[in-house]
Amino acid sequence: MTLAGMLEAAEAAAPVESLDVVARILKERLGASSVSFLIIDFTGSSVVRLGAAGSVKTGEPAQRIPVRGTPYDDVIRSQRPSVEQTGAAELARIIVPVTNRGDAIGLLELFLPAAPNPEVMREIGESAHALAYIIIANRSFTDVYQWGRRTVPLSLAAEIQHRLLPASLACEAAQFAVAGALEPADHVGGDTFDYVIDRDTVQLSVTDAMGHDVGAALLATLVVGALRRARRAGAGLDEQARQADQAMRDHGRQGYVTGQLLRISLLDGTTEFVNAGHPWPLRLRDGEVREIVPKIDPPFGLGLRAAPTNTYRVQSLDLRPGDRLVMLTDGMLERNAQNLHLPDLIVHTRALHPREAARTLIGAILDAGHGHLDDDATVMCLDWHGPRNTHRVAATGADLTDASEPAETTRTPTMTPDVR
């Protein structure tokens, strides 16, 4: 069956039955004894097997399969398929990534009676790519995929927080790759991140609402909603920031939200930036991490009782092809992580795709806090390839360095402020 035929067959089924359709087609065409999809959970540290629709009991907690040290982890990180012989019957176990534009959704796992030849592997890869589109098309109609991503119960604040994030936590494009990761604190704060691609620009934002639990989540909802509303109306960064501040004044309770807004032209690389009382971003260039020190404007809603005199300055930001930009919240600067040198870690993860680098940075902060955080930790990682890179292959996204070349992690990491 062609790729188009598989998509058509899945589309004809109910949203929760689309996985069954793909499994049935692969069993019939390839003689697979077993076909299953494993979805990656919110943390990226485990997967959940989604079998036939009738076997998914969403009233029960999802069963986690930790991926660390397993072939699943290797396939997710490398975005390359795994083939191995297994079991007394010498079945071939094939694991392939289910990924769309760098957003690692999950894995397709098959057991075949014999090792596949290149033509069969090509068909399996195309099926996994089709499955990514099928899931993206269907996940707005069913909670099955959301259920699979929740390996621990979410509080109300965490539920609100996750719904404020973009539908895909990573995006691979010709001119750039971007990914975000968020780890809620024990008492959820109000961290969010967002990105959007327009015809001529890519825009990013990171925000951090004061406080914890539902109160912080509601403040975050106000600001993210105001930013998206202004952005979708075509407003510039200064107007987006002004409307976010006004929304806090009109509807917010006592409190404030810090934030950063970034817009990059996909035509010429011109970069605009607004900093509303937020921790400075870090830029990796030629093996050296610099702290970008912009002019600082007030957080959104600071001094709610005062007259709305806040204005937000749009600044330029020096971003060149080959740079990696890391935007973060103050939870990444946790007191418990004082012995963790973030610039070193940014350099040492340079060879990873932004998706994996962001997860590694969050994981290091979580490990430093022995699994507990006093504040949400959020990071966005952007690789800028430049406006002339319009023919990059952007289907999956994985490691950036060629195995035959020395990795940049051999350089001595340093960090100095950049005040330009």
Image: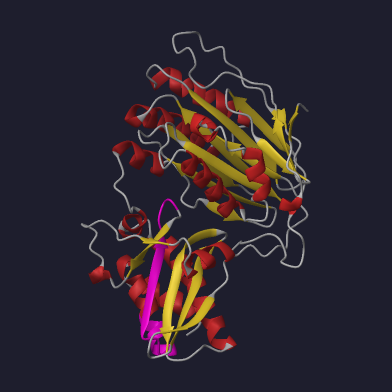
Q: Nearer the viewer, residue 364 or 170?
A: 364
Name the image quarter holding the C terminus: top right
Identify the residue at horizontal 48%, vertical 74% (top origin). 95
Residue at the top extreme, as displayed: 306
Tell me what residue is drawn at x 61 percent, y 19 percent. 297
Question: Is residue 39 inside the magenta stretch?
Answer: yes
Residue furthest to the left in view is 59
The residue at the far front in this view is 339
Q: How is the image coloured?
A: secondary structure
Return the x and y of residue 288 as percentages of the image width and height.
Answer: 75, 41
Give 231 or 172, whichever is nearer the viewer. Answer: 172
Name the residue rendered at 30%, 61% in the picture.
Answer: 63
Please state the horizontal and vertical placement of residue 175, each as a whole percent of the image. 70, 53
Can you give x and y, in whole percent of width and height, for residue 218 in the image? 37, 30
| Figure check: 170 above or below 50 | above
Report the magenta residues as a range: 24-43
Q: Is residue 200 visible?
A: no
Task: Report the front residue among 10 and 124.
Answer: 124
Is residue 126 visible in this depiction of the protein? yes
Residue 213, given in percent of the width and then of the height, sits at: 34, 31
Q: Along the line of sight, which residue is nearer the eye, 312 or 401?
A: 401
Q: Is residue 317 left or right of residue 312?
A: right
Judge left or right: residue 331 versus residue 118: left
Q: Residue at x 35, y 33 (%)?
A: 187
Q: In this rendering, would 394 be left or right of 13? A: right
Q: Is residue 126 shown above or below 210?
A: below
Residue 358 highlighted magenta (yes or no) = no
